[in-house]
Structures are given as structure tokens and as C-alpha cells.
Image: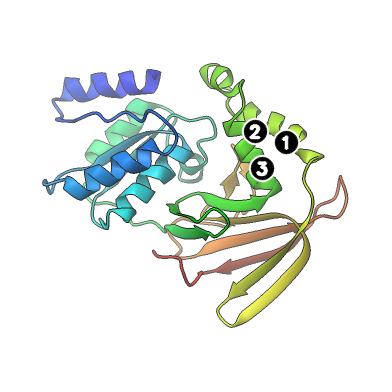
Amino acid sequence: MATWHIVKDELNRRGVEFRVRTSKHPGHTVELAHQIAKFNDRDDTVLLVIGGDGTLNQAVTGIREAGNTTMPVAYVPAGSGNDFARANRISKDPLKVLDAIIDTTEPVRIDIGEFHERTRNQHGYFVNNVGVGFDAAVVDAANHSRVKPFLNRMHLGTLAYLLSVFSVLFNRHAFEARVNVGDDHDIIPNAYICTTTNHPYFGGGVRIMPGASVIDGQLDLVIVEEKHFFYVPVLNDTNFVPQEARF
């Protein structure tokens, strides 16, 4: 990875001590972050994540599953979508990002969402977004696209999401969504997109929720009802703090 070599050379030039852990397969980052957070014995350790939004989410999940709530996480974007970096105005230049990381004296606390997926009995944490329906299918298709690695090398990773939109568009159907927030309940009979997001962006730059912020203590729920091919209005757009979310 070109970004990693740039960062590595700069860390060596500055004399910064570091150890490298490389993710080998899907989900491996969760395991690596868990091990680092569980067995770290130094107070000055910072976990530096280099990768895309998925890599960052997996790293956060691993740390939280290890029960570690104090280890700082730094991030150098090197993925195809880089929505977290876009939302937080993190530079695309790895050297500028590394300068900011090294010059930082206090960590910034951000919101973290927690989810439980009952069908597959999956559990995890996220700093970007998590969803079901059309949006989730697009992300899944993009992540498994054969052309995505090539587009990433050409710095056109966002196109992988756009291409996946057309491959998924005619294969998805509406579903019933039930939303429970405290004592309030709502049912959306023809939901097409259902996304809980922590910041404005989704799918490589789509502004799905312009007012969302990673530091406002809230998650944002966006539900789009299936209406017409060219017309999909936002049916339910609300700020909420889920009972199972931890910040």
C-alpha cells in the first residue's frame, strides 16, 4: 500500500517507535485490534489505523470488544470511500495527517454506535453508518466488486459504489421497518433504505444526512420509503440515541 510506505518512511525519519500489524483477511482487523488493546502494557500507545472506513470500524470494534476505553485511535485514510475522513475534514495527504497526529496532545472524544444483528447473530461498533436494505446492498456489492481494487489504484474508488447502484437497483424490494426509540414506536411499511449514521456521508461522498456530527452525542436515523424510480423522499429523518448505543 502506497500510503503505508509514505507513513512508514516518515515515522522512521522522525524516530517514532512503532510496530506493524497487517490485516490478512476480512475481519482480521478486529482480531488484531482486540489483541493490541487487550495486551498492551504501555500508557503512551496510540493505535494508528491506515485503511478505509471498514478498516477503521473494525479497529474500533476490536478495541471495544477488548474492554479498552482509553486507547487513542489515530487514522490515516487510504480506502475507496473515505467517508469518515470527508466528514471530519481529514486531509488526503498522509504526511499532513501524520503531522496533525504527532502534534496532537489530547485525544478528541467522538460518538460510537453499537449494533446487534439478530439474523446472523453479529455484534459490532461503528463510527460511520450501519444500515439494511438498498444502501447496505450497494456497499456489500461494492466491497465484493472485482473492479474495486483497480479503481482504488486509479484513485477512483468512489466509482465502485456508483457502479454497484445500478447492479442492485432492480434487485431490491421494500420491507417493513419497525423503529423503537424509548417508548415511541413507528412502523414504515415500504422502507427501501434504512441507515443509522454518525456523520453526513455514505457510499463515498453521498450526503445522506447533512447535519450529522460525530461529536454531538447523537446518531441519526434515515429511512427512505420506496415510491418511484425517480422519486424516493425521506420519510423519517430523526435524531436519536438508541438504548443499546454507547458513547
Q: Is residue 149 above or below residue 76?
A: above
* SS label for mark 1: helix
The answer, for residue 108, to whether it is visible in the render is: no
- Give the amino acid at mark 3: Ala
Structural crowding at the residue carrying mark 1, measured as other residues with C-alpha within 10 Å and reported as few (<14), some (14–19) or many (≥20): some
| Res 247 quadrant in image | bottom left
Check contact, mark 2 vs mark 1: CB within 8 A.
yes
| Residue indicated by mark 1 | 165
Residue at 52% in and 41% down: 83
In which image quadrant can residue 70 be found?
bottom left
Residue receiving disc 3: 137
Residue 56, horizontal then vertical, whole percent: 41, 41
Q: Amino acid at mark 2?
A: Tyr
Mark in front: 3 vs 2: 3
How far across and how far down the image is residue 246, in percent?
Answer: 40, 65
Question: Residue placed at 71% from the left, 47% from the top?
Answer: 134
Residue beneath disc 2 = 161
On the rendered structure, is 210 left or right of 74?
A: right
Is residue 11 found left or right of 81 in the rendered image?
Answer: left
Which of label 1 and label 3 is nearer to you?
A: 3
Please, which residue is most extreme toward the front here? 120
Separation of marks 2 and 1 at Cα, in angstroms: 6 Å
Give the position of the N terminus as an image quadrant.
Answer: top left
Where residue 62 sits: x, y (%)? 34, 48
Q: Residues within 10 Å of mark 3 (few under 14, many from 20)?
A: many
